[in-house]
Image (cartoon, rainbow, N blue to C red):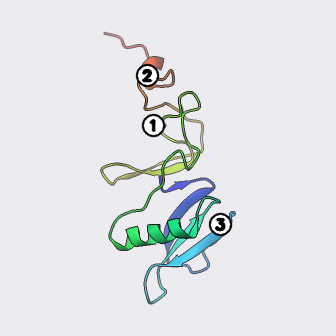
Amino acid sequence: MICSGSLGMTVTDQKNYQRKEPVKIRPLNGENSLFMAFWGKKWEDEKMDQAVEIHKSGHHPWFCQKCANRICPVCGGNLLNPMCSDSIHDDGTTSHCSILPVPQYCENPQCSRHPKSKVEVKE
């Protein structure tokens, strides 16, 4: 994940990037024209520095659904569409799931919240 309500990070050209939550800023280049903004209580200095280095190496930093408190309430597995979140996928694509009510299906096929356990398959 790259953003989830009260926990997230983004690249910005604004040194004074603002959100409702407190924001910590780290410079990304020597000219101080590009910054990485972090918000949420879970960001420690070491983790922010790691995220900056990951970005500088050409990759997109991310954090897990568990850290963002976006996990299945039944089994603790990952959600297929974590509500109110921007997600980065294994192939590098990103997606956004709005805060609107959406089914919170679980990726775990053994879980009662997995989509196949909710949908009857008609053959």
Q: Secondary structure at mark 1?
A: loop
Q: Residue at x 53, y 49 (%)?
A: 85
Count of marks overlaid on the render:
3
Q: Residues within 10 Å of mark 3 (few under 14, many from 20)?
A: few
The amino acid pointed to by label 3 is Arg
| Depicted 7 relative to depicted 113: above or below | below
Residue at the extreme bottom: 31
User: Height in image: 37 above or below 16?
Assistant: above
Q: Residue at x 57, y 75 (%)?
A: 25
Q: CA distance from mark 1 to mark 3?
A: 27 Å
Say which residue appears at 45% left-offset and 57% top-offset.
62
Query: What residue is shown with label 2?
Result: 110
Mark 2 surroundings within 10 Å by alpha-carbon count, few (fewer than 14), some (14 through 19), many (20 or more): few
Describe the element under mark 2 as helix, strand or loop: loop
How many other residues sit within 10 Å of disc 1, few (<14), some (14-19) or many (≥20)? some
- First in sequence: mark 2 or mark 1? 1
- Residue under label 1, please give it: 80
| Callout 3: SS | loop
Which one is earlier in the sequence, the residue at label 1 or at label 3?
Answer: 3
Image depth: mark 3 or mark 2 in front: 2
Three-letter code, disc 1? Leu
Question: Mark 2 near mark 1, Cβ–Cβ under 8 Å?
Answer: no
* Residue at point 68%, 63% (across, down): 21
Amino acid type, residue under disc 2 in the picture: Gln
Residue holding disc 3: 19
